[in-house]
């Protein structure tokens, strides 16, 4: 159950066998069905998730419409980090796009784990750095790239998601309408 978790962690920080055994006691395992809401808009995010299997979608809701902010795949940490870190109501929602197997840690358990295994703070910092870099890449793409360029980059980096994620969610992540995405895809298939 923790094999993927520690494989993900190993390039970032090296845990001893004792560290690993202790870390495992602070996480719980949870299976959630497709469309299950893990974090509701306006609620405090009290948990973070490591995805062993499945996909999770972080999204905003504006004028009754969902806007996909990020799609988390297997072997990534996921959550509404802003809400989790501040323990304040979330402005985002988090849902399962597929039946998912998750390792779950609560805010309180993470704080305890920081004291017992200081390398967890290093791991958290490095994950936060990766999230910051990803956020900067997404933001710069919205500013610098055309919708067609954003699609090409998404397809190159995440081609496997095209069969796993509804295209209207991908379109909202790219900042375009589903109709525009359809036109871009047709134009690129038939130059």
Image (cartoon, rainbow, N blue to C red):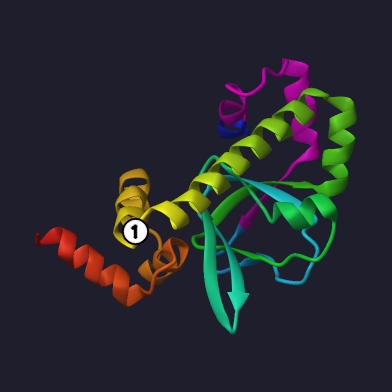
Q: Residue at x 36, y 67 (%)?
A: 167
Place of residue 141 in the rendered image (x, y in percent of width and height, measured from the top left): 44, 51
Near-viewer residue (130 or 35):
130
**Residue 28 magenta-drawn?**
yes
User: Is there any visible trace of residue 160 in the rendered image?
Assistant: no
* Residue 158 image point, x, y percent: 37, 48
Q: Report how many numbered discs are placed on residues in the image.
A: 1
Circle 1: is it few (<14), some (14-19), or many (20+) Cα within 10 Å? few
Secondary structure type for disc 1:
loop
Q: Residue furthest bottom?
A: 63
Which percent across, then down, holds residue 157? 36, 44
Left or right of 6 on screen, residue 84:
right
Residue at the image position 30 percent from the left and 72 percent from the top: 180
Quadrant in the picture for residue 92:
bottom right
Stretch in magenta: 6-31
From the viewer's side, name the closer residue of 136 and 46.
Answer: 136
Residue projecting furthest to the front: 144
Q: Is residue 41 above or below residue 14?
A: below
Query: Which residue does the image show at 52% across and 53% down from the upper left?
Result: 139
Image quarter for residue 11? top right
Quadrant in which residue 112 is drawn: top right
Q: Quick one: 35 or 33, which is closer to the camera?
A: 35
Q: Is 13 drawn above or below residue 126 in the view shown? A: above
Residue position for label 1: 146
Q: Is residue 158 visible?
A: yes
Q: Does residue 145 show up magenta in the picture?
A: no
């Amino acid at each position: 159950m923790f094999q993927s978790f520690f494989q993900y962690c190993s390039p970032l920080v090296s845990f001893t066998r004792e560290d690993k055994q202790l870390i495992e006691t602070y996480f719980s395992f949870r299976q959630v069905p497709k469309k299950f809401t893990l974090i509701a808009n306006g609620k405090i995010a009290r948990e973070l998730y490591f995805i062993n299997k499945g996909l999770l979608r972080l999204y905003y809701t504006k004028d009754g419409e969902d806007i996909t902010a990020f799609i988390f795949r297997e072997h990534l940490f996921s959550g509404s980090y802003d809400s989790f870190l501040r323990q304040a109501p979330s402005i985002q929602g988090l849902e399962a796009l597929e039946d998912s197997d998750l390792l779950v840690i609560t805010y309180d358990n993470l704080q305890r784990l920081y004291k017992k295994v200081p390398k967890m703070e290093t791991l958290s910092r490095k994950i936060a750095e990766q999230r910051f870099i990803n956020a900067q890449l997404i933001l710069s793409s919205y500013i610098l790239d055309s919708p067609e360029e954003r699609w090409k980059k998404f397809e190159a980096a995440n081609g496997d998601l095209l069969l796993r994620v509804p295209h209207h969610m991908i379109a909202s992540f790219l900042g375009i309408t589903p109709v525009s995405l359809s036109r871009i895809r047709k134009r690129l298939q038939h130059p």
